[in-house]
Amino acid sequence: MTEAREIFRDEARSQFIIVTIPTMMAVNESSRLADALRKEDVPVRYILVNQVLDGATSDAFFSNQWKDQQKALAVLKSTEKELGKLDVIESPVLDLEVRGVPALTYFGDIVWKE
C-alpha cells in the first residue's frame, strides 16, 4: 500500500483524470473527488466531461438538456470551485458504445486533440 500511495502521488509516474457528465450532481461529486485527491497529494490536471450535447437541435427535450448542461459546465469551469483549476476536456455524445480498441482509438482521437 505504501508503494502504491507513492506511485499515485508521483506526478512523473501517474496522474488521475476525473471523468464526469455535465449535470449538477456529477459536477458536485467531481468537486468532492478533486478535493479528496488533492488532500492525498494525488496529482489531478484534467477533467473529462462525457456526453456533451452540441446545442444544434430543434427538439425541445435535447434543447432543454443542452441548457442544463451549459449551466453545469459553467459551474465546472468556475474558479470558485476547485474544479475550475483543472483543464476541461469535453467529449460529445457518441452514437456508439466505446468498447474495443477501434472505438477507444476513435474516442481518444476526439478527446486528446493535443
Image (spheres, grey):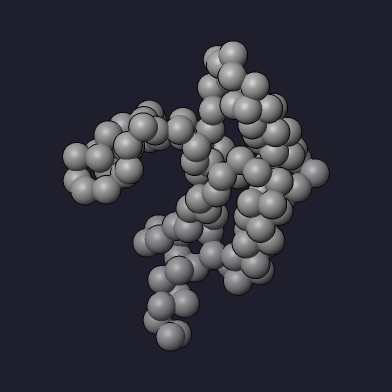
State the residue in front, 35 or 96.
Answer: 96
- Occupied quadrant, residue 106: top left
Residue farthest along the bottom direction in this orientation: 1
Q: Is residue 108 above or below residue 61?
A: below
Q: Residue 18's x, y, as percent? A: 52, 53
Task: Name the quadrant of the C terminus.
Answer: top left
Along the horizontal axis of the image, is 6 left or right of 41?
A: left
Q: Residue 88's x, y, as percent? A: 56, 38
On the question of residue 88 being in view, the answer is: yes
Along the horizontal axis of the image, is 65 left or right of 93?
A: right
Residue farthest along the front direction in this orientation: 60
Residue under the image location 39 percent in, 33 percent down = 94
**Total marks in image:** 0
Q: Is residue 73 above or below residue 47?
A: above
Along the horizontal axis of the image, is 80 left or right of 28?
A: right
Task: Name the quadrant of the N terminus.
Answer: bottom left
Q: Residue 78's x, y, as percent? A: 74, 38
Residue under the image location 56 percent in, 16 percent down = 57
On the question of residue 38 being in view, the answer is: no
Residue under the image location 71 percent in, 46 percent down = 24
Q: Residue 19's x, y, as percent? A: 50, 50
Residue under the image location 80 percent in, 44 percent down = 80
Q: Is residue 1 above or below residue 8?
A: below
